[in-house]
Amino acid sequence: MMVREQDPPLNLAMLASWIRDKGVETAILDCAIDAPTVTLFRDKLLQIIQKHKEKKIFIGFYVCTPTAYYCYMLAKIARELFPDCTLIAGGPHASFMYEEVLTLAPIDIAIIGEGEITLEEIIADKPLDTINGLAYKDKTESSIKVTASRARIEDINNLPMPAYDLLKIRKYRPPVGTFKRLPSFMVTFSRGCPNNCFFCTKTLGFKHYQKSSENIFKEIKYLFDTFGIKDFVFVDDTFTAYRDNTIAFCKLLIENKLKISWHCYTRVNTIDKELIGWMKKAGCHQLMFGVESFSPEVLTLINKDINLQQIEAAVKMTRQAGIACRLSMMIGNRGDTAESLKHSLKELLRLQPDFISVLIATPGPGTPFFEWADKENRILTRDWSLYTGGTPVVRLEGISSEEISCYYKLYWKKFYFYPGSIWRLLKYTTNIYQAYSLMVGFLRVMKFMIVRR
C-alpha cells in the first residue's frame, strides 16, 4: 500500500502504449513529477488539452487507495476546466470501490481490472453497456451500471512495450537501499499473482503471467541503450515464479555482456542454489523476500504458505551467493500479539539479513483482510489517506493500535541500530551511490524515530 512520489507510473505507460498503437494521441501527466501542486496541475492539463482541443478528450486517473481523495479533487478540477470531456478512473481502488469513485468524484467510467481492451473500446465509442469490465453512470436512470467482467489478456508477450518515452525516466528513483548505482529504474514484467495472501489485492485475479525471457531482455536493453539505465529494480511480486524463464533471462544478460545491476522481489519458496547462482552471475545484487512474520500461527492465518525453515534457508543461500538479502515484515497482521511480534523481532536479529522493510498491515479494499475486518467491525477508519502502511487502521484482539505503532518503530530501531547491521551495511557500501543511499537511509530512520516519539 505504500505510495512513493518517485515511483514511475508503469501502468499508465502500458495503457498509453496500447492505445497509441491504435492511432490515439496520448500523453501522460505524472502529478508527482510534473504537477505536484493544484496550480501546476491546472496549467499542465490546460497545456496538454490545448494541443488536442479539436478532438474528443478522455482524461484518465489511476486511483490507488491512499491517493483516492487526491484523485477525486483532481477529477473535479478537470471537470471544471473541460465540462464535456470523458473522465475515466482505473487502478485497484476504482476496481473494488467503483461505486464510491463514481459517487464522490465527477468520474464517468470506472474500469474494473485490466484496462487495455476496455479503454480501447471506450475510446472507440462503443455503447458502454456492451463493453466488459467497467462500471459507469447511467445518466438516464441516475444509477450506476456494472457490465460483465473482462477476460484477462493471457499472452502478455503480445502487449507493446510500455511507452517509456512519455515518462521523464531520469527523474524517477527506486527506494533508498534498493539500487546499487544511478541512474536506476523500476520495471515489471508480469501480471497477476498465483498466491492467496490474506492482505494482498487481487486487481487482476489469481492467474499469473510473465513475459518471456527474450521480451524481458529486450525491454532492459532498450532502457539501457536509450536512457542509459544501468540499474533496475524488478517490482514483480514474485520475479522468480517461473524458474526456467528467470535462468534464461540471466543467460541472455551474460551472453550479451549487458553489464547491469538489479534487485528483485520474490518468495522464499521459489528459489534454489542454482537459480541464485545464475542471478548473481547476471548482476543481481539484492533479493527481497516477503516474509511478513516468524510466527507459524500468523503465517497460517494470512495464507502465506511458507515456513520458518524456508525463510532461514533462503537467507543462508542468498548470503552464500554474495547477494544482499532484504526481508519484508508486517506489523499487526491477523493473529498478531505482543508475543508474536517480540518473537519475530528476535528472529530478525538472529538471522541478520542485510536490510529490512517494515509496514503496518493494512487491508486494502478487495483483499480478504478488508472483507474480514469489515465483517467483524474491526475497521478503525475509512480515511483512505491513512492506508499507507504507516498507521494502524484495524482493531485486533490482544494488542492495541498504540502497541502496534510502538512495535513498528521498534523494528526499525532495533534492527538498523544493531551493531551487526551497521557493520554489514558498511561492508555492503562499495561505491558513492551506495554511500549516498546509506546516508539518506540513516537520516530518514533518524527522522522517523524522532517524529514518532
Image (cartoon, rainbow, N blue to C red):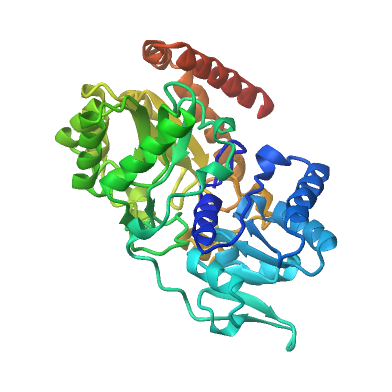
Name the spot of residue 387 as percent of width and height, x first: 61, 49
In the rendered image of this protein, does residue 43 appear above or below residue 102? above
Q: Is residue 17 visible?
A: yes
Q: Nearer the viewer, residue 218 or 427?
A: 218
Name the spot of residue 44 as percent of width and height, x first: 76, 46
Q: Nearer the viewer, residue 412 or 206?
A: 206
Q: Quadrant of residue 20?
A: bottom right
Name the spot of residue 145 as percent of width and height, x first: 62, 82
Tell me the quadrant of the picture where the C terminus can be found.
Answer: top right
Q: Which residue sits at x=61%, y=67%?
A: 97
Residue 190 in the figure: left or right of residue 85 = left
Name the spot of residue 264 as percent of width and height, x first: 36, 37
In the rendered image of this protein, does residue 335 appear above or below residue 373? above
Q: Quadrant of residue 443?
A: top right
In the rendered image of this protein, does residue 269 appear above or below residue 382? above
Residue 308 in the figure: left or right of residue 101 = left
Q: Nearer the viewer, residue 47 or 232?
A: 47
In the rendered image of this protein, does residue 171 appear above or below residue 201? above
Q: Nearer the viewer, residue 60 or 341?
A: 60
Q: Which residue sits at x=48%, y=35%?
A: 358
